[in-house]
Amino acid sequence: METLMAVIIGILFSIGAYLILSKSLLRIILGSSVIAHGTHLLIITMGGLKTGGPPILGGRADSYTDPLPQALILTAIVINFALTAFLLVLAYRSYAKLGTDNMDQLRGINDE
Amino acid sequence: MMNNLVVLPLLIPLLAGLIMAMFRKNIPFHRWFSLFSFSLTFAVSLYLIHQVSIGGIQILELGGWPAPFGIVLVVDMLSALLLTTTSFVGIACILFAFKSIGEEREQFYFYPLFQFLITGVNGSFLTGDLFNLFVCFEVMLISSYVLLSLGGTRIQFRETIKYVVINSLSSTLFLVAVAYLYASVGTLNIAHLSIRVAEAGQTGFMTTIAILFLTVFSLKAALFLFFWLPGSYSAAPTAIAAVFGALLTKVGIYAIFRMFYLVFYHQPEITHALMGVMAALTMLLGGIGAVAHWDIRNILAYNVIIGVGFIVSGLAVFTYVALIGVIYYIIHDMVMKALLFLLGGTMIRIVGTSKLKEMSGLIRNHPLLGWLFFIAAFSLAGVPPLSGFIGKILIIQEGLAKGAANAGFYWLAAIGLLSSLMIIYSLMKIFINGFWGETFLTRNMEKGSTKGLLLPCVLLTTVGILWGVGAEIFYPVIEQAAKSMLNPNFYIEAVLREVV
């Protein structure tokens, strides 16, 4: 299971890196979002994957899942959600103002 | 020692920001309430310094959960000093913003956002938990994104996009590093991490994780990976640029400080040497940038980079005396960078352009501004008895002393000295072009007035001079901060409440 997860995380990271390196602003935002998802999967995998174990350490359970990574990714997902929403609004507003979403034209050589 | 006061520097700005956000239209209330909030934070931080100097490190276990399980807030002397400086710089920048930020920005939550920014900064200084540090970073960064884009001019949008993308990417890397660290040692409490890493031994794998952390924090602190900084800091309005230049990079440096003095201190020949190389390159490249540009905003932004490089070079030297120098210097740098940005902003406001070649002879009508700039420039270059001197001499002296064992440190010290020269050259360029020469502008031709703008500058200068002249008075406090940074056991004992 961990091996499969590692491969998936790797694929997500490479897709994200590819998207971030492109010129269109929307693709860059999607890319950073995909990378963030890869990170969340990484955190939950790093906590150890166990099927069926409750996240409670009690007398009866044979195995238990580490609850901490779950709490961590919950926080990370919320933060990333807010960040992506902000970035999308920013991209929309700057497209309206600057008239382009091509990063090549956003270099900013002394034009103002 | 448990102490409920510890949470206040986090709580006061947060609550103040929330209350202000409810009364959007009432600008005078926003102004005076934010001033009140920072003054209160300042008073609390001073009291915390007093308590730490008497009773040692103060902690607060949030929700009553004991240390490795719950989140702890920790105030040692370094945090207390940085908290105090932060709220002081906050007061100065808010005073400057009163007259300069403009009604439009004020109506769109400028003051509440400023409060949230300081919440994030204070939280990063306070927290004793690595994941909580990430959250505080995000609070700080998200407020900074909004502050940077607030106003919506073309240049702001263009630079904010780059700033947001690079920072969200580095936050992602931060999480990756946290995940690896959690997988290998199974804890995220900084004190507990310190014990576990020491027990397990800092193997090659650990050092790799440490370098990942160094990369992340360097992106935030503009250490070597500073390519995003000049553009975004010069796009912001003065009051915002001042607080960014003074505080945001220092938070990154503080994180490097914590991680590489408390947790990953077992292999300084790799991690700290890497820091030294990065610091040297940062000083050189930042210096070249500062010397080359002819635009006030750009010169000041590159000066921030040189400052970061110099502080980290002190961290890389990794001795007790150098550490004292670093603590002197980091506080000097916070105050002086804020001052420099405010003074530069005032000049730009008077002339109406930031291009040096289009200004001249300001000293005739604005003697106070000119002299304040002169003091700031000399202070940053490290001329005694001003505040930059003591930090610089300690760091360079230790670098030279260590150079006998490892010639690399000679280079570091030499580049440190060279960087001072570049600072004074770049700032004197502003001084000569801006203040000397023929006075083109008569008083009624000026684009903006300096009314009320010089008060925060005078405040900052006074504190800067006091910090330099009164260095001896502050020495016991600094000494305590350095001792507790160099002995991780103090921190561990205070947080985990057990004798190691």
Image: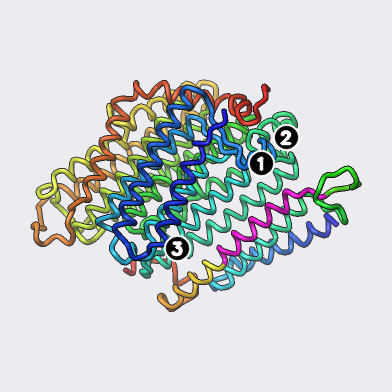
Q: Let me know if residue B289 is in the magenta part.
A: no
Q: Is residue B435 left or right of residue B63?
A: left
- Residue B160 numbered tag: 3
The span picked out in magenta is: A65-84
Give how far across and how far down residue B80 sits, in percent: 46, 34
Q: How is the image coloured?
A: rainbow
In the rendered image, the vertical position of residue B252 relative to residue B237, given as above or below: above
- Residue B203 numbered tag: 2
Q: First in sequence, mark 1 or 2: give its number.
A: 1
In the image shown, does B199 or B82 lie closer to the viewer? B82
Q: Chain of mark 2?
A: B
- Residue B283 numbered tag: none
Q: Chain of mark 3?
A: B
Under circle 3, the secondary element is helix
Give how far across and how far down residue B186 sits, in percent: 74, 41
Q: Image point 62% across, 55% down: which residue?
A: B172
At label 3, the amino acid type is Thr
